């Protein structure tokens, strides 16, 4: 099934983010925070079309001073998601490693291995340890 797609142009004007649908809907809004744009515009489009947000797509276009910054914004957003996934993986692996090595070698040695203070390692020994199945290695990606 094909879902409709709507293009949203995002600009920065007078200290607020302005988002406007350009595909025949009279949908526009101003946002103080960038992170509020996506959910806010999905709600507006859903209200105007009668479709739930999972039944349509939003194509984003970012324009600043009449220059199209869409590719760079989307690349940054993807890089940010990848970095968060990698950081979450690192934290899970680190917690499991500390749990496994604690009692086998000193906390100072674990700290040296991980590049942490022994105090931080001591804190980690008292934190919950994720199951191996919950520590998911992010997919491979190719830098742009």
Image (cartoon, rainbow, N blue to C red):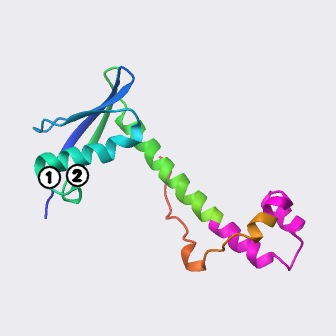
User: Which of these two is toward me, 142 or 55?
Assistant: 55
Disc 1 is placed on an element classified as loop
Relative image position of residue 44 (x, y in whole percent): 21, 44
Q: Are circles 1 and 2 on residues that touch, CB within 8 Å? A: yes
Residue 138, visible in the rendered structure: yes
* Residue on which disc 2 sits: 57
Would residue 43 be found to the left or right of residue 103 on screen?
Answer: left
Q: Is residue 89 left or right of residue 16?
A: right
Mark 1 to mark 2 CA distance (whole Å): 6 Å
**Disc 1 packing (10 Å; few <14; some 14–19; many ≥20):** few
Magenta region:
92-121
Q: Is residue 117 above or below residue 44?
A: below
Which of the 4 image quarters holds residue 66? Answer: top left
**Figure check: 51 above or below 23:** below
Magenta stretch, main secondary structure class: helix
| Residue displayed at 29% across by 41% down | 60
């Amino acid at each position: 099934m094909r879902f409709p797609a709507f293009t949203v142009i995002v600009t920065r004007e007078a200290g607020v983010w302005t988002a406007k649908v350009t595909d025949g809907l009279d949908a526009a809004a101003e946002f103080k925070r960038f992170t509020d744009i996506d959910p806010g515009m999905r709600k507006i489009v859903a209200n105007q079309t009668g479709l739930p947000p999972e039944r349509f797509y939003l194509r984003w276009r970012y324009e600043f001073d009449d220059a199209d910054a869409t590719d760079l914004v989307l690349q940054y957003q993807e890089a940010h998601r990848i970095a968060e996934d990698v950081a979450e993986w690192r934290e899970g692996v680190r917690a499991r490693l500390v749990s496994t090595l604690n009692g086998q070698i000193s906390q100072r040695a674990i700290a040296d291995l991980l590049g942490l203070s022994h105090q931080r390692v001591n804190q980690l020994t008292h934190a919950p340890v994720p199951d191996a199945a919950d520590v998911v290695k992010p997919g491979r990606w190719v830098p742009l």
